[in-house]
Image (cartoon, helix red, strand yellow):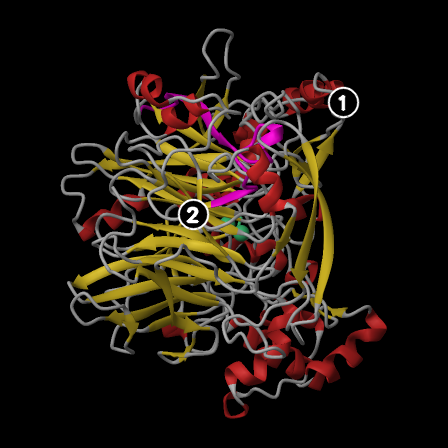
Amino acid sequence: MNRRDLLSLLGLGAASLAATARPSTGAPAGRAPFPPVPTPLPVPSDGLDAAGQRRRYARVELEDRLVLPEGYRAEVLAVWGDPVADGRFGFNNDHLSFLALGPDQALLTVNFEYISPRTWREGYTEAVGEAGGGDLPFEALIEALSPAGGRVDASSLAEDDPLLGQIRRVAAAAMADLGVGVIELEREPEGPWRRRPGIFDRRITGLSGWRDPAGRLGVTGPAAAVFRRCARLGYDDGLGEAIIGSFANCAGGETPWGTVLSAEENVQSQVPEAVHADGSSVAPAARPFAWDGQRLDGLGNPFGLAGNKYGWMVEIDPRRPRAAALKHSWLGRFRHEAVAVKAEAGQPLIVYSGCDRHGGHLYRFVSSGTIIDPADPANSGLFAQGRLEVARFDPPAAGTGGEGRGRWLPLEPSTPVDPLTPAHFARFGLEQAVLLPHSDRRQPGAEAFASEAAVAAYRRRFPSLAELYPGEGEEQMGAILIDAHLAACAAGATPGARPEDTVIDPTSGDLLIAFTAGGGSDDGRADPAIFRGPQGQPTWPYGWIMRLADGGPARGGSFRWRMVATGGAPWQGGLGFSNPDNLAVDRRGHLWMTTDRSTRSADLDLFGNNSCWVLPSRGPSAGEAFCFATGPMECELTGPCFDASESTLFLAVQHPGDDHGSRPSLEAREAQSHRLVDRSGRPFEQLRWVPLGSNWPSGVPGRTPRPGVVAIRRLAGGPLLDG
Ligand code: FEO
Ligand code: CA
Ligand code: CA
């Protein structure tokens, strides 16, 4: 990453660059639009010379609190367990969406992504209360499941089996903490936002509609035809088009007509992901319920949930608490992370989304219909008909300064099968099989192909998606959309570096994408021709931000792309953060970004606690990256969004204490040693003290941490940033 790339991202031209560029190892950075929060490692924007960096960073102590710039204050709006409508504020809040109802009244829509078993169990009774069923049979269930390795296929148990009753109590409690919530906010004029429970408060949980059919979710687009089928290769939940609940709700976005899009991401932890050639699910037994005190998953198993009904983009209208939430199947089923909506009068609706897994793809939906008024709520109807396309990136050609091109591949029956092959990865010294829809089409899920000959034979047998997904009309199209990830692999889409959030830059109309990490796992591997480290490394676990200029909505259209910010240590070519995740752009085009570096990876300890950064687009500090906040221990900051005047930043603190649970005392800490490099390139040692566990937000040793949402303002009021 260099300064030119970053300025390019933020829409500044070469003239601005020439006026402000500095040598990367030279003088300290320009003035920040706020007093930056100290980072645990030297960063280009810390304002210190080399000697100053060695002094400041020789000894560092991390803190179990939300650290903000001087002159800013955070107020807790809601935490896990707070009553919301007929349920409670859920666990591990992620995406936040602010919708103004008036100058001093608003709705905040919140995603609840997953359960951290340790802190959830530790804090459950306190958060939910004895009266609310806070006495769950955690220990009895661990004991009962122990002989079977902590797991059981609950769908095989008789309805009157007491074990099924215990399992359902624990699983239903966890599902009640997932999904989406809407809470009302109010404030005195110019005062801080506070929660005021009201008529718009709402909870959609992982089990909405299980007992009460009126709470079920709906589906639009061709997957409905698959759900309706009587004859199918796999599992039938008996519900037709109706859907129970939503879970694994990670990032999301908003439409210009006031609805919220909520992305179902890692649903494979709760229900089977693999589907048959006709789009039907494998039976719930394939993802058994598991609880051993350390892991809690397979939550769909005791309720017989069909896996093909999860992994979608869900649209919710927070102003209509009784309207059913809709899963829009034209946007495809995969591990949806982010979503970004482009809605311009006279154009089709375009919706971008990414699939967060190693080798996950970037997609766009293009509606058949055209937008007349972007603010018209009837635009939701545009999701009902269109096409899904997936990105194929070409590497930058010589002399382009790192700008590459690409094109959109439609996912439809006539799409040729043309996958990346193992030889592509071998050119970068990587041994990588490619995953494709199983060649025995009676088998669900994927099959790995490790040789060129095997892939060539596959292509001869299945020349197009129509041969992989037999059938007709909506049933065939629905099967492709339900199996979108593997269909995209077959079509030759570029395997990505775990795409997380996407956002439209309002100053350029371009798409910004956080690719959180380049590497591989059993899921697949990022294309090393596209996702390369600063020195061309084929694996780069610290991530990037990409800018993509879309060439228009034409079928199979083209785009241009460029990496514009690189994660990693400054002495390795990064900006000092690791693993960009959520993105937000304020109205001046400044980019806000939160990180999600795994706290279980010692290789990433260097980067300290997860954090929130601002990358200004203009002014004397344009082209730098400044740390705005660092989170409490073992958490991730998520969901950055603003109120209408951009004087308040809303942030979610997700999974505090994820590794060590409650911090028992201030003595619970460990010493770490880090080898750092100062601005002049000289190495030095750091002693770092790291608290173990968290007590956020109470700050009281021994108290269980709770995920929650905060509102951040300046003590003096006014816009969040200077200038
Ligand atoms: Fe739930 Fe990809 O973050
Ligand atoms: Ca995320
Ligand atoms: Ca995350």
Q: Which residue type carries mark 2? A: Pro
9 inside magenta stretch: no
Residue 417: percent from left, percent from top: 57, 24
Residue 521 horizontal side relative to residue 367, left or right: right
Q: Position of residue 427 (x, y in %)?
A: 71, 16
Q: Which residue is mark 2?
A: 36
**Rendered position, 652 above or below 211:** above
683 relative position to 83: left or right = right
Nearer to me, 401 or 571: 571
Between circles 1 and 2, the one closer to the viewer is 2
- Residue 490's quadrant in the figure? top right
Disc 2 packing (10 Å; few <14; some 14–19; many ≥20) = many
Residue 451, label in figure? 1
Measuring 64% from the left and 83% from the top, which residue is drawn there?
Answer: 165
Q: Are marks 1 and 2 in contact (CB under 8 Å)?
A: no
On the picture, is 662 further left or further right than 70? right
Which kind of residue does numbered mark 1 sit on?
A: Ser
**Residue 473, quarter of picture:** top left
Magenta highlight range: 554-581
| Location of the C terminus (image quadrant) | top left
